[in-house]
Amino acid sequence: MASDLSTSPASPGLISQVADLSERLGALVDALDPDTLLGADATALYGDVCRMERLVVAAKTLLAPRIAASGHWEAEGHRSPADLLATLEGGSAGQAKRTLETGQRLSALPSVEEAMRAGKLSGAKAAEITDAATWDPGAESQLLAGSEHESLRATKERCQRVKATSAKHDPLARAQRIHANRSFAHWTDADGAFHYQGQDTPERGAALMARLVPMANRLRSARRAAAADGAAPPPPEPEAALRADAFFLLVGGGCVADAGGPGPADADDLVSRPPTASVIVRVDRDALVRGRADPGELCELDGHGPIPVPLAAALAVDSFLCLVFTEAGDIKAVSHVGRTINQKLRTALVFRDRTCVVPGCSMPYGLEIDHVRPMEFGGPTTLDNLALLCHHHHRLKSYEGWVLERHGPTDDEPGWSFTPQAPFGQEPGLGIDRPPEARPRK
């Protein structure tokens, strides 16, 4: 069992001050009678209490690393410092770990620490800013500027942009890491209610919301129409409830009566369905031309955060992509880059392929249209250059370097192959990938 590594006990004066402050705050809350206050007074008091809360969070954030370094958590029989902090707070280990991580980063971020000690940053904002400043320490002042008065969402967006363009950041590696950490968890609570949560990549989140929101809107319209025929229409349902119903219909393959709901998502659905998503990408012109975003530049899904520049181009396949070109913060142009396959070509494609064309797969559901030779490299939108892939194999081709090739002479026998990209320097045609006796003589 580890012993406390503290060099000296805490100052009795500091401990007594905190105890006195706690006692006085407890008496204040005990005597608080909100009904006797004017709205303006209640609002002013709320703001003062929020500042006190930020100061308390700052103290917790400063104390947490010392608790971790001292080893006292182990002496108390806890599995980790975060476990002890969570026990003291009565909260989750995840939140306690976030507080500890924020505190450990503060030693290298004096300006952020100063802002926290002054009560200017909430714990959530401090966590976002310290995380982003760890990726790019030179952006500490930029991250702090205006953070005290802006919303948490605005702070998160600015932090995401800094991380996305930092020198340490590999946008494709980040996309692969997020994809590798995708998850779906579910549980049943004490009342028997089914709960679920998870995480996924931003482009899949955007595609989900592009389906979910219109479905919820169609549900609302259908229920209003049905209520119009009844004597006592039901009260309007909250948006969260409509989206829960829409999510179930999308997953279950149900439909909305007279509202254009989805049918089974098989190959035939590709013939008549609209583009899979309508998304807006905010991108700097120079970043699009260069193929990557440098510090201070944008390439992000509107409402979903930064994405790699190559992904912005890939999203245009079988979707309606709205590109908003910016330069120095100003909108320079808007372009609707639709690559949606026309219905005749869709019909021919589905007639030929029916399932994922990768040998051994044959997945009939969730199919996506792929340009065998990408459009950005001159690939035409013709039947010979199109194929149906399941999402898994489409992703491998787009982001992992796998190669799809057609070898068959006719549409009856297209003869597909799907192989990983050869290691650098061993691409076909160089001769390095062949045995010495088979290599061409110089």
Image: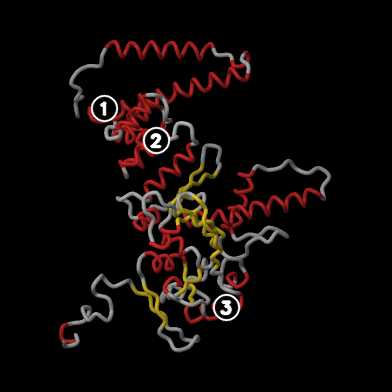
- Image spot of residue 223 (x, y percent): 73, 50
Nearest to the observer: residue 265 or residue 319: 319
**Quadrant including the C terminus:** bottom left
Three-letter code, disc 2 = Leu
Please indicate whether residue 81 sits to the left or right of residue 344 in the image.
Answer: left
Label 1 – label 2 distance at C-alpha: 25 Å
Which label was assigned to residue 144? Answer: 2
**Quadrant including the N terminus:** top left
Reading the image, the residue beneath label 1 is 66
- Image spot of residue 72 (x, y percent): 24, 26
Above or below, 260 relative to 12: below
The image quarter containing residue 291 is bottom left
Which residue is situated farthest in the right direction here? Answer: 231
Label 3 – label 2 distance at C-alpha: 52 Å
- Image spot of residue 288 (x, y percent): 43, 61
Three-letter code, disc 1 = Arg
- Mark 1 or mark 3: which is in front? 3
Please indicate whether residue 138 sits to the left or right of residue 182 in the image.
Answer: left
Q: Residue at x 51, y 13 (%)?
A: 30
Reading the image, the residue beneath label 3 is 345
Asked which secondary structure carries label 1, the reply is helix
Q: State which tag comes first along the sequence, 1 or 2.
A: 1
